[in-house]
Amino acid sequence: MKPIQIRIDGHIHKTSQEICMDFLNTERWSEFTGYTILPGIKNAHFEVKTSGWVGSRIKVENTDGSSHIEEIIEWDEQNRIAMKFQNFSAPLRHLATHFIESWEFSTTSSGTNVTRKMVFYAKGIIGWIFLLPISRLMKKAFEESLRKAQ
Protein backbone atom coordinates (compact mmCIF):
# COMPACT_ATOMS: atom_id res chain seq x y z
CA MET A 1 0.00 0.00 0.00
CA LYS A 2 1.31 3.41 -0.98
CA PRO A 3 2.10 5.66 2.01
CA ILE A 4 0.27 8.97 2.45
CA GLN A 5 2.53 12.02 2.17
CA ILE A 6 2.09 15.66 3.14
CA ARG A 7 4.43 18.60 2.58
CA ILE A 8 4.60 22.26 3.47
CA ASP A 9 7.16 24.86 2.43
CA GLY A 10 7.90 28.07 4.25
CA HIS A 11 10.44 30.51 5.59
CA ILE A 12 11.61 30.97 9.18
CA HIS A 13 13.68 33.98 10.27
CA LYS A 14 16.18 31.79 12.12
CA THR A 15 19.21 29.75 11.14
CA SER A 16 18.79 26.01 10.67
CA GLN A 17 20.92 25.54 13.81
CA GLU A 18 18.48 27.70 15.81
CA ILE A 19 15.54 25.74 14.41
CA CYS A 20 17.21 22.48 15.47
CA MET A 21 17.95 23.82 18.96
CA ASP A 22 14.27 24.81 19.27
CA PHE A 23 13.35 21.26 18.24
CA LEU A 24 15.56 19.79 20.99
CA ASN A 25 13.83 21.93 23.64
CA THR A 26 11.07 19.46 24.50
CA GLU A 27 9.58 21.91 27.04
CA ARG A 28 8.34 23.90 24.02
CA TRP A 29 6.70 20.93 22.28
CA SER A 30 3.38 21.73 23.98
CA GLU A 31 3.25 24.78 21.69
CA PHE A 32 2.11 22.29 19.01
CA THR A 33 -1.63 22.60 19.59
CA GLY A 34 -2.89 20.27 16.84
CA TYR A 35 -5.75 21.24 14.59
CA THR A 36 -9.51 20.83 15.24
CA ILE A 37 -9.87 17.19 16.40
CA LEU A 38 -6.15 16.39 15.89
CA PRO A 39 -4.66 16.55 19.39
CA GLY A 40 -1.80 18.77 20.39
CA ILE A 41 1.17 17.78 22.52
CA LYS A 42 0.68 17.84 26.29
CA ASN A 43 4.30 17.07 27.16
CA ALA A 44 7.44 15.49 25.76
CA HIS A 45 10.72 14.37 27.26
CA PHE A 46 13.84 12.52 26.18
CA GLU A 47 13.89 8.85 27.16
CA VAL A 48 17.28 8.37 25.48
CA LYS A 49 19.83 11.02 24.45
CA THR A 50 22.73 10.03 22.22
CA SER A 51 25.81 11.91 21.16
CA GLY A 52 25.11 13.33 17.72
CA TRP A 53 21.35 12.96 18.44
CA VAL A 54 20.66 10.08 15.98
CA GLY A 55 19.03 7.29 17.99
CA SER A 56 17.69 9.68 20.64
CA ARG A 57 14.12 8.86 21.64
CA ILE A 58 11.47 11.29 22.82
CA LYS A 59 8.31 10.16 24.63
CA VAL A 60 5.31 12.26 23.62
CA GLU A 61 1.99 12.48 25.47
CA ASN A 62 -0.81 14.17 23.53
CA THR A 63 -3.69 16.27 24.84
CA ASP A 64 -6.15 13.42 24.17
CA GLY A 65 -4.17 11.00 26.38
CA SER A 66 -2.58 9.13 23.46
CA SER A 67 1.19 8.71 23.26
CA HIS A 68 4.03 7.70 20.96
CA ILE A 69 7.81 7.71 20.65
CA GLU A 70 9.73 9.93 18.24
CA GLU A 71 13.19 8.63 17.37
CA ILE A 72 15.69 10.91 15.65
CA ILE A 73 16.86 9.03 12.56
CA GLU A 74 18.74 11.85 10.77
CA TRP A 75 20.52 14.86 12.24
CA ASP A 76 22.33 17.30 9.96
CA GLU A 77 21.65 20.80 11.28
CA GLN A 78 22.75 22.38 7.99
CA ASN A 79 20.57 20.32 5.67
CA ARG A 80 18.02 17.89 7.12
CA ILE A 81 16.65 16.26 10.24
CA ALA A 82 14.16 13.39 10.43
CA MET A 83 12.19 11.56 13.09
CA LYS A 84 10.39 8.24 13.14
CA PHE A 85 7.08 8.24 15.03
CA GLN A 86 6.40 4.79 16.46
CA ASN A 87 5.07 2.80 19.44
CA PHE A 88 1.68 4.46 19.13
CA SER A 89 -0.95 3.92 21.78
CA ALA A 90 -4.46 2.86 20.78
CA PRO A 91 -6.26 3.58 18.57
CA LEU A 92 -3.44 4.77 16.26
CA ARG A 93 -1.39 1.61 16.81
CA HIS A 94 -4.15 -0.29 15.00
CA LEU A 95 -4.02 2.06 12.00
CA ALA A 96 -0.32 2.80 11.38
CA THR A 97 3.05 1.13 11.64
CA HIS A 98 4.96 4.43 11.82
CA PHE A 99 5.30 7.96 10.44
CA ILE A 100 8.45 9.67 9.17
CA GLU A 101 8.72 13.44 9.61
CA SER A 102 11.55 15.36 7.96
CA TRP A 103 12.71 18.97 7.86
CA GLU A 104 14.92 20.12 4.98
CA PHE A 105 16.79 23.42 5.27
CA SER A 106 18.07 25.95 2.76
CA THR A 107 19.85 29.05 4.07
CA THR A 108 18.82 32.47 2.81
CA SER A 109 19.99 35.98 3.66
CA SER A 110 16.96 36.44 5.95
CA GLY A 111 16.81 33.03 7.61
CA THR A 112 15.98 29.53 6.40
CA ASN A 113 13.63 28.08 3.82
CA VAL A 114 12.08 24.95 5.31
CA THR A 115 10.37 21.98 3.70
CA ARG A 116 8.53 19.90 6.27
CA LYS A 117 7.20 16.50 5.21
CA MET A 118 5.43 13.63 6.87
CA VAL A 119 4.90 10.16 5.44
CA PHE A 120 2.20 7.98 7.02
CA TYR A 121 2.59 4.18 6.79
CA ALA A 122 -0.80 2.50 7.22
CA LYS A 123 -1.63 -0.98 8.44
CA GLY A 124 -3.82 -2.12 5.58
CA ILE A 125 -6.63 -0.43 3.72
CA ILE A 126 -8.69 0.39 6.83
CA GLY A 127 -5.70 2.15 8.36
CA TRP A 128 -5.11 4.03 5.11
CA ILE A 129 -8.75 5.18 5.00
CA PHE A 130 -8.52 6.56 8.56
CA LEU A 131 -5.06 8.08 8.07
CA LEU A 132 -6.09 10.10 5.00
CA PRO A 133 -8.19 12.67 6.93
CA ILE A 134 -5.66 12.59 9.78
CA SER A 135 -2.92 13.52 7.29
CA ARG A 136 -4.98 16.48 6.07
CA LEU A 137 -5.42 17.73 9.64
CA MET A 138 -1.69 17.26 10.27
CA LYS A 139 -0.90 19.37 7.21
CA LYS A 140 -3.14 22.17 8.57
CA ALA A 141 -1.42 21.83 11.98
CA PHE A 142 2.01 22.07 10.30
CA GLU A 143 0.89 25.20 8.42
CA GLU A 144 -0.30 26.80 11.66
CA SER A 145 2.93 25.84 13.44
CA LEU A 146 4.97 27.41 10.62
CA ARG A 147 2.95 30.64 10.85
CA LYS A 148 3.73 30.83 14.57
CA ALA A 149 7.45 30.16 13.94
CA GLN A 150 7.84 33.03 11.49
Image: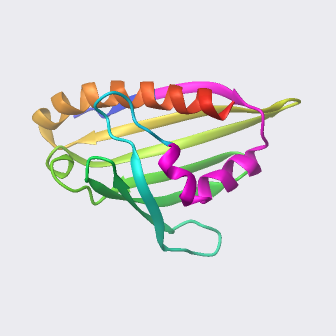
Kindly identify the residue that appears in the image at 69 percent across and 38 percent down: 105
With 97 as the anchor, is 74 left or right in this view? right
- Classified by dominant secondary structure, the portion drawn in magenta counts as helix
Q: Nearer the viewer, residue 88 or 147?
A: 147
Q: Position of residue 39 (x, y in %)?
A: 33, 40
Q: Nearer the viewer, residue 34 or 100?
A: 34
Kindly identify the residue that appears in the image at 60 percent across and 50 percent down: 81
Count of labels in the image: 0
Image quarter where the C terminus lies is top right
The magenta span reads: 7-31
In the depicted structure, whether residue 125 falls above or below residue 94? above
Q: Which residue in the rendered view is the most extreme toward the right? A: 109
Q: Nearer the viewer, residue 26 or 131?
A: 26
In the depicted structure, whether residue 121 falls above or below residue 98? above
Residue 27 shown in magenta: yes
Kindly identify the residue that appears in the image at 64 percent across and 46 percent down: 80
User: Residue 70's image quarter?
Assistant: bottom left
Q: Nearer the viewer, residue 71 or 26?
A: 26
Q: Is residue 78 visible?
A: no
With 112 as the anchor, is 119 left or right in this view? left
Kindly identify the residue that appears in the image at 18 percent across and 31 percent down: 130
With 25 as the anchor, is 3 left or right in this view? left
In the depicted structure, whether residue 57 falls above or below residue 111? below
Q: Is residue 8 visible?
A: yes
Q: Which residue in the rendered view is the most extreme toward the left? A: 126
Q: Position of residue 107 (x, y in %)?
A: 80, 36
With 44 as the anchor, is 61 left or right in this view? left
In the depicted structure, whether residue 24 falls above or below residue 14? below
Residue 116 shown in magenta: no
Q: Position of residue 56 (x, y in %)?
A: 51, 68
Image quarter where the N terminus lies is top left
